[in-house]
Image (tube, rainbow, N blue to C red):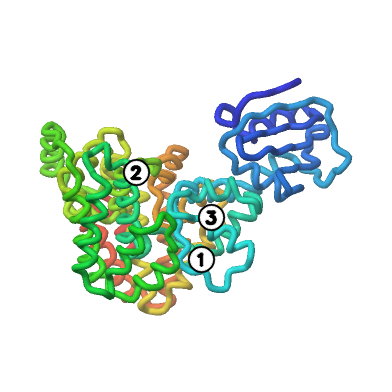
Amino acid sequence: MGLKGNLQSIPLWEILQTISIGKKTGRLEIDNGSKRAEIFIDNGKIVNVRSGFIEGYDALLGIVLWNKGDFVFYPEEKTSQKLLNLDPLEVLINVSVYIDLINYLGDFILLPVRVDGLALEEEVISSAFDGILKVRDVILNSPLGEYRSLEIIKKLIKEKKLIFPEEDSRVFLLYTFWRRWRYLLKEGNKIGVNERNLRKVIKDFISGMQEELSFIIEDITSSDNVSWHYFYRNIVKFPESKIEVFFREAFEVLNKQIKMPSDRKKLEQFSILLGEKGDNIYVSVNRNLDTNELIVSLFFNGERSLKQVFHYSLLDKTETQSIIVDLITNKYLIDVSEDKKLDLIHSFYIFWRRFLREMKEKGLDNELIEIYRKYIDSSILDIRLMFSHVIEGYVPNFAYFDKEKEKYSEEEIAEFIKGGIDLIFNEMKKKIGETDLKLLLQKVLEEIKILNPRNVEKYAMVV
C-alpha cells in the first residue's frame, strides 16, 4: 500500500501532482462516506476515472468538487479501459471555474419555486432542495454525478426555477417563518415552548385572519413537507407590503411563546454597539449557523446597517440583540469598514447593482453585463473568478469573498475593480453620451456614499 490520508489535510490536486511528478502508476481510491471513486494513473497521467455509474472526464470533474474523504493509492494497479490521457495540472486549470463555483454556491440554500417544463434530470435535482439541504449537499449526493448536477443547478438558477430565499422579500419572509416554526417544534421544549400551546395559538391566529392569507400559515404549520412552488405561486399574488405585515403578526405570535431569560451583559454590549456602529454595514461571513443565527444573519444582506437589521428583524428584540452580539463576538458578522479588502469588494457590489438598475431603465442592462463579462473573460488573473459571481446575479456570498480576498493584495483588488469600471465608462459613453453617463454615475456614487462613504473616491476617480 502506498500514499494515504484525507482530503481535508491534503487537497486532491496536491495528491495527483505528487503522483504525476513521480510518474507513478496505480489506482487512487477515494471514499467520502457516501460515494467511492477510483482514479487510474499510468506513468503520471490520468487514464480513467470511475465514480458510481459515472466514468471518464465527467467523473473526474465531479470528484474535484469533493472537499472531504479518505484516500489510498495502490501502486501498480492498472485498468484495461484507458479512456483518458490527462496531465493533472492541465485538468486543474480547466476545472478551476467549477471548483470556484461550488465554493461560491456550496453553502447556499435554494428553493424550487417553478416546476413547469422540467426535464427528468432537472426534476431530480429540483426536488432534492427541501429548504434545508445546501447546494453542496445536493451536488455531492446526486445520482447524476457532481459535474452534471452543478450544470443543472446553474441552468435552473438562470431560469429562476431555483431561487435564493433572499431574492424575493415575500419568499424570504415565508422561508424564515417556516424555519422558525420547525425550530420551535423540535427545540422549543428547551426554551419553555409547549407544542400543544404553540399549535393552539397558531390555530387561533389563523381563525382570526383574512381567508385569502390564512391558507399560508395553515398549510406551512400542518406538514413537514413544504411544496415551495405551490407557496411561491400563491404568495407572489400579494404586494410585498401586505405579506410583510402578515408575517410580522405571525412572528409576533411565535415570539410570545418563547420564555428566554435576558442576558443583561449582552444587552449592554449591544446598546454600546448600536450607539457606536449602528450606521455601519455588517455582513455574514459564515453560513453554517444554527436556525436562529441563520435567520438573523440573512437580514445582513450587505445593504442594511446594523441599526436597520435590528429594527427589521422579525425575532423578539431581546433575542435579536443577544444573537447579534454572539455573531459579532464569534466573528461570524464583520463590519466591512474594518477590512479594507472586503470594503472594496462590498462597494463594487453596491456600485454594480445600482449601475445595472440604471442601465436596465435605459434597456442597456444586457449590454452592460456583456461588456463586463468580456472584461472578466479577457483576464488571465484568478481574481476574475471572484468578480464573475457579481454579474451573474447571484445573492452575494460574503463568506466566500472574505475567504478569497486573502489570495490578493488590496492593490490587486482595487486595480481589477478600477480596470472594469474604466472599461464600462468607455463603452457605455458610446451608448448614451459622456455627459449623461457622468450624471448617471454621479447619482450612483451618491447612493454608494450613503451606504459606504469610505470608498466613493475610488469610484469617483473614473468619472
Q: CA distance from mark 3 to mark 2?
A: 22 Å
Amino acid type for the residue under numbered disc 1: Lys
Of the residues under marks 3 and 2, which one precedes in the sequence? Answer: 3
Q: Is residue 220 left or right of residue 368?
A: left
Residue 358: percent from the left, percent from the top? 34, 72
Dividing the picture into quadrants, the one containing residue 206 is bottom left
Residue at 69% over, 32% down: 17
Dividing the picture into quadrants, the one containing residue 261 is top left
Q: Which mark is residue 128?
A: 3
Residue at 73% over, 32% down: 28
Residue at 26% over, 44% down: 337
Amino acid type for the residue under numbered disc 3: Ala
Observer-side mark, 3 or 2, equals 2
Q: At numbered mark 1, what does the secondary structure look like: helix, strand or loop?
A: helix
- Residue 158 visible in the shown view: yes
**Are the two marked residues, 3 and 2, in contact with CB atoms closer than 8 angstroms?**
no
> Which of these two is toward me, 460 or 383?
383
Furthest residue in direction right, as rendered: 80
The crowding category of the residue bearing disc 3, from other C-alpha atoms within 10 Å (few below 14, some 14 to 19, many at least 20), is: many
- The residue beneath circle 1 is 158
From this view, report whether residue 293 is shown above or below residue 352: above
- The residue beneath circle 2 is 186
Residue 284: percent from the left, percent from the top? 33, 45
The crowding category of the residue bearing disc 1, from other C-alpha atoms within 10 Å (few below 14, some 14 to 19, many at least 20), is: some
